[in-house]
Amino acid sequence: MKNRILNLAAGLLLGTSALQAQDIHFSQFYASPLNLNPATTGVLSCDLRFSAIYRNQWASVLNSKAFSTFSAGVETRLPVGKWDYWGLGLNLWADKAGTSSFSSVHGSINGSFIKRLGGRRSLDMFLVAGGSLGFSQKSINTLNLQFGSQWNGDQFDGSSSNGENTSGWQTRLTYADIGAGLFWWMALDHDAKSTVNAGIAFTHLTKAKINFLNRSNEFDALFMKSTVHFGGDFRVKRRLAIVPNVIMFFQGPSVETNLGAAIKFDFSKRAVSNQAFEIGPWLRIVSSPTGQIASDALVAMMRIRYGSSTFGLSYDINISRLRPATRGNGAFEVSYVYTLCGVRNRPLGCPTF
């Protein structure tokens, strides 16, 4: 009985957070650059990049109603003069959360300008300014909503009155969404095997009001989200590197921080390798609207790059207060990135997403 109550309580919390959630997120944020920062658009050492990622969360509690998120993007770069570029990309994502089937679909066009700041080989530096213009649509199934008044002390009773009139609710909302960002990176050695990067991005600049109740004066606008990220790829031996990354999301009263590092091993003996294996741990820390800071999840990550393809896999181990209900089960993600290089491809020595 105790476990069932915990599971139901967790389901309530998760279903409620789905209605209040401000944005999607991925543990493998580096595998979805167009969602990370519009200024990463076109930042690649090849001519074309396709990326796709899928996340499934809370399946141990919500079963078929688990949160699921899918995103895909394609991007390219166009030369401007000798060293500068235009970046162009298309980004799509869809998300479905909880027992209310709270769904979001988003599509955007991303653009950027990649400017070389100077340097020669070992000190090449670039600065990128980017933006995104898109539309989002959110929908909800009000028939599946559960309210506290339907709790009879042991379980939810869907036949009892919930005390709410949902007949006048909207079930679908569409709004424009704009983002902007800056991204900087520098190569630290001759073959750009060691790099360092940093970026900042702002999304939801339109601050749309998402309100299914037709009472706009009672709801605040969607919080603008600020993203700060930095990392690097530091070669310690000819075929061994350390890849640290830190990313912070600020949205309204909430803060999320992801930090960790991977060890990368190049298993090709060539000087410029396109075959590598990465593995490493991550920690996600969250700050609640009340100011409490707590550990949310440990993330185990691995990636393998072979030729033009990069495969990624990660698993979130839940260490939050929901751990008794979830039994430590959090989320798993799988990602795929494909890069297409032309005959006249000009490498930029940029970070590998």
Image (spheres, rainbow, N blue to C red):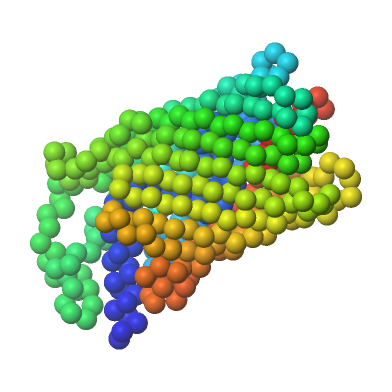
**Coordinates of residue 35 in the picture (x, y in percent):** 50, 40
Whether residue 338 sits left or right of residue 295 in the image: it is right
Q: Quadrant of residue 90?
A: top right
| Percent coordinates x, y for residue 347 in the rendering | 76, 30
Quadrant assignment for the N terminus: bottom left
* 114 versus 252 height, above or below: above
Q: Is residue 297 above or below residue 77?
A: below
* Residue for point 69% across, 45% down: 233
Say which quadrant the C terminus sits in.
top right
Residue at image x 47%, y 64%?
297
Q: Residue at x 62, y 55 (%)?
A: 261
- Number of marks drawn: 0
Can residue 346 be seen? yes
**In this picture, is 218 found above or below 59?**
above
**Residue 46, horizontal then vertical, whole percent:** 72, 32
- Taking the image as drawn, is residue 64 in sight? no
Q: Is residue 133 above or below residue 165?
A: above
Q: Which residue is rendered at x = 59% and y = 31% of the image?
A: 184
| Closer to the camera in the image, 306 or 241 | 241
In the rendered view, does 235 fall on the left or right side of 71? right
Instruction: Pick the residue in front: 188 or 240.
Output: 188
Question: Residue lying furthest bottom in this view?
Answer: 1
Write down the quadrant of residue 68 in the picture. bottom left
Left or right for 177, reference 350: left
How far across and how far down the image is residue 43, in percent?
A: 63, 32
